[in-house]
Image: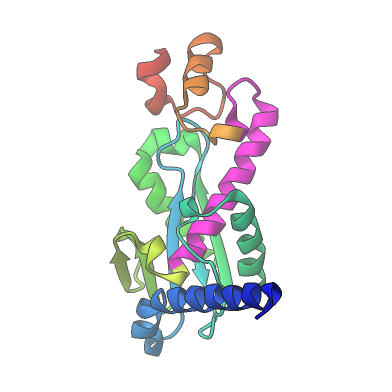
Amino acid sequence: MTKKEEQELKRQAKLEKERARIETMKVYEKEYESHGWICGIDEVGRGPLCGPVVASAVILPKDCQILYLNDSKKLSEKKREELYDVIMEQAIAVGVGMASPERIDEINILQATYEAMRQAISGLKVKPAVLLNDAVTIPGVEIPQIPIIKGDAKSVSIAAASIIAKVTRDRMMMEYDRIYPGYDLASNKGYGTKVHMEALRTIGPCEIHRRTFIKNICG
């Protein structure tokens, strides 16, 4: 066997392993597919000191063959960007919702997260029959919901929603870094890194900081 043939065999083996992993992430979709369209829901940005919380709702085709779907935190930025384009191209429907820093301060982060999720669902052009949610049950939603702990690693639909939400928010934070320099938002995406915390103490907060999150840092 030549080296090239050996490399091709290894590549095929890795591909088959990935296909098998993706099939295990379709267990919930297969369980509920007789009900109609299945929608995955996830959010990004509950923990940062600034910026919005972003939620996404994604309905994938029933014969979805997208590989490498996973919890967005387990993927590289390059892979998330690649998958974002594939999901947007192949999904039956995608909805995105968000709650601003002001809204988070007004109603608290949990309620703001629920609000963003409801927005994402209402933005879908196809009505789902079942919602697969990452860990939560969303109040005020009549569609049947299945909360799944660590769902973004167990369901292709939730993983897809996780990626859409993450890329959407990260792109926003990159733009905010240009508007509000000094906080290193392009790198930390609003999370409380050492550089970010020091900037808060020296130059103070900007318009997109969550006041309820930073009151113990800069008063």
**Residue at the front extreme, as displayed:** 1
For residue 180, side relative to residue 215 (left or right): right
The answer to which quarter of the image holds residue 89 is bottom right
Question: Which residue is pictured at 62% across the width and 61% down the height?
Answer: 84
Q: Is residue 139 above or below residue 109?
A: below
In the depicted structure, whether residue 37 falls above or below residue 201: below
Q: In the image, is residue 161 above or below residue 48?
A: below
Which residue is nearer to you in this view: 15 or 219? 15
Instruction: Name the quadrant containing residue 10.
Output: bottom right
Name the image quarter holding the N terminus. bottom right
Residue sitting at x 55%, y 30%: 208
Q: Which residues are magenta?
A: 158-186
Q: Is residue 171 magenta?
A: yes
- Residue 9's x, y, as percent? 60, 78
Q: How many marks?
A: 0
Residue 110 visible at all: yes
Overall secondary structure of the magenta stretch? helix
Q: Identify the residue shown where x is 56% and y is 12%.
A: 203
Q: Which quadrant does the C terminus fall into?
A: top left
User: Residue 51: x percent and y percent?
Assistant: 53, 36
Left or right, 36 with respect to 90, comes to left
